[in-house]
Amino acid sequence: MVNKFIKKYFIVIFLIAITGCKSGAMIDDSQQESDSSPSSSSSNADNIANPSDSSLSASALDTTPVVAVVSTADTGSSSAEESSGYNVESGEFNLLPRAVDGWDKTGWSLLTPSEDSRLIYVDADIGNDETAEFYAPRDILDIYNPGLIKPFRTVESAIENTRQGYPDWVLLHRGQEWELIPRTAIKGGRSVDERSVLTSYGEVGARPVLSNSGKDILRIWANKYYIAITGISFYSQARDPNSPFFAGWRSLSELNGLVIYGPEATTMGSILIEDNHFNYLTKGISIIGNGDHRDIVIRRNLIRNSYNDLGHSQGMSAAKTSALVEENVFDHNGWYIQQKEKDGRENDEGQGTIYNHNTYFTKSADTIFRNNIFLRPSSIHNKWTANPSEVGTDQVMSQNLVMENNLYVGGEIGISAGGNDDYNTGPRWKNIKIVDNIMLAIGRDQPTNRTLGWYIDTVDWDGGEVCGNYLLNNDNILVQNINAIKINGHSNDVTVSKNLIYGLKMTDASTKNGGITVDDSPKTNIKVRDNNIQLVDSQMLPLIVETVIPGMFENNIYFTSSDLTNWFRADEESYSYDDWVTLATDAGSSNEQQIFQSPERTFETYLSSIGLSPDIDTFVESIANLPVRTWDDRFSAETINTYIREGYGNTTCE
């Protein structure tokens, strides 16, 4: 018995020795991904139909994410999920800083290695995969400026020396670039507090750049949890038409930045994506598979210039995902040049098409978009779909979605929560909130060569709220197919309130395009109240209602420059204000022109006010040039939206 005990003791000591600080490279081949894993190109988010007229309805949803404080696992044990399974609830966001010690003073997540973490450094210039060592945190005084070390040369070798289920770190030297082997995948960590980390190090330098010639630059593949990726640039110079290394049209391959894959009948997540740049890719971030993806936190990333000359393209696409998407900037995604044809479907040379958007989420639940800036998409800023699983029958397929205090500029549609398959039998959405957003100049860019500017487009909602949004100032006279808010489809328990509709200019009155439009599909308990619809120098009608339901409208302020006898349209007839009030029993409303303090405020005037050239390209490049973990409040949605609101009295949904 003593001999057996001694043998076990020395085995333990030996294992500790070879895994301790400054250890030599150890390759865990068993953790490499199989080539049989499905390709990211099979995402069911690719089947996007042309957005049709939509409708609105939603109920209240608490926008505060649930934060779970999960106890740290024994640092000597392996991954907790290997024995117990991943069990984070949908809508539960384990934000490291809020759950542990708080963010730093500028709001960046605080990531700290564990005692048994491996710190694995990578330097493309001086690294050597044969002689490299990994380090214990206790032996490195400053993780991000480690001094004299023996780094790896390749990212792949560094990842091979991480362990599945451990909080190991791979740190890439700033200012350097790597061409990764296709199908490069990173491993999962131990818990929500002890994540595997891919990040950067060095006193100065731009974000390290990752690219490859395959389908995906980097993967988080099946059943990998508890991961953080921060301070990395995903970029393809072969796809950048402004680069001397551009491959040329008709020679491009599809290339996604980061792909997260959850296979059917699995649940995976607790993934933090923060402070990364995605540029000139097919999709910046793509979440695919029929599994459930939970606790996906996308913070403070710059996602731009996604395009495709072979198929569809998105800034970010996600299937069956519960995500917190906050303080990101999405710009010019889904297109490189304007559509040359009239039908908006050709994609040669990266033309904008009706299928491409800044974000595309399908069958989503418990997801929050908050304080993001969305600029110049090919078609839609936020595209949501809820396609029924049974042919012929509508079902609730997306629920508990919040879009709050985001800024939208350009494109042709702001928010579409209505597509795509609709059998006209009932609701497909439940509990949706669109609150306190600013939308400017929707319809300006005409990327698909269409002439529409739809701000909020909804259909088939079972409970929800559209409140406190500022829908402002279209500035393209060629775009006359304009709608501010559509309430269509089988909808019930929906409140549309405190929205300001201003500066939407149509040269002719239309029987289909109005400030707020309501179709004749079955509806119950729809309330349109306390809205301010100001259509100065516009022939647009404040309201177009296919079937009048008495008591639906109250306490609104209406004004249009249209003919006084033609301010409202209901049941295919035109009505003056007085006749409308009687017909709809519109209590407490008024017809008056409002005078605002600074209605000329736009995104461009804001840029001038902070000393920047008043154009989007300058704004985006200013953000792109910020160093790692640098936050400038002047470039935030909160600051810009406050500037816009103050020009109109600063009304919000609260």
Image (tube, helix red, strand yellow):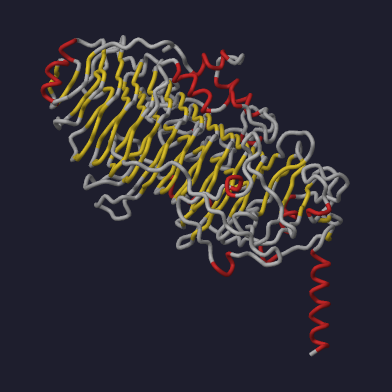
Q: Is residue 156 left or right of residue 40?
A: right
Residue 163 visible? The answer is: yes
| Residue nearest the viewer, comparing 243 with 434 | 434
Instruction: Name the residue at 80% across, 68% down.
Output: 16
From the top left corner, tell me how far across and down residue 65 is, in percent. Answer: 48, 45
**Hey, which residue is sitting farthest bottom in the picture?**
1
Q: Quadrant of the C terminus?
A: top left
**Closer to the camera in the image, 63 or 574:** 63
Residue found 38% across the figure and 11% down from its top = 596
Q: Residue 104 appears in which quarter of the rendering?
A: top right
**Residue at the limit of the structure toward the right, as seen here:** 148
Image vertical order of residue 137 relative to residue 402, above or below: below
Quarter of the N terminus within the rendering: bottom right
The percent position of residue 435, horizontal first and vertical second, equals: 39, 33
Q: Residue 253 at x, y = what percent?
A: 58, 42
Res. 215 visible in picture: no
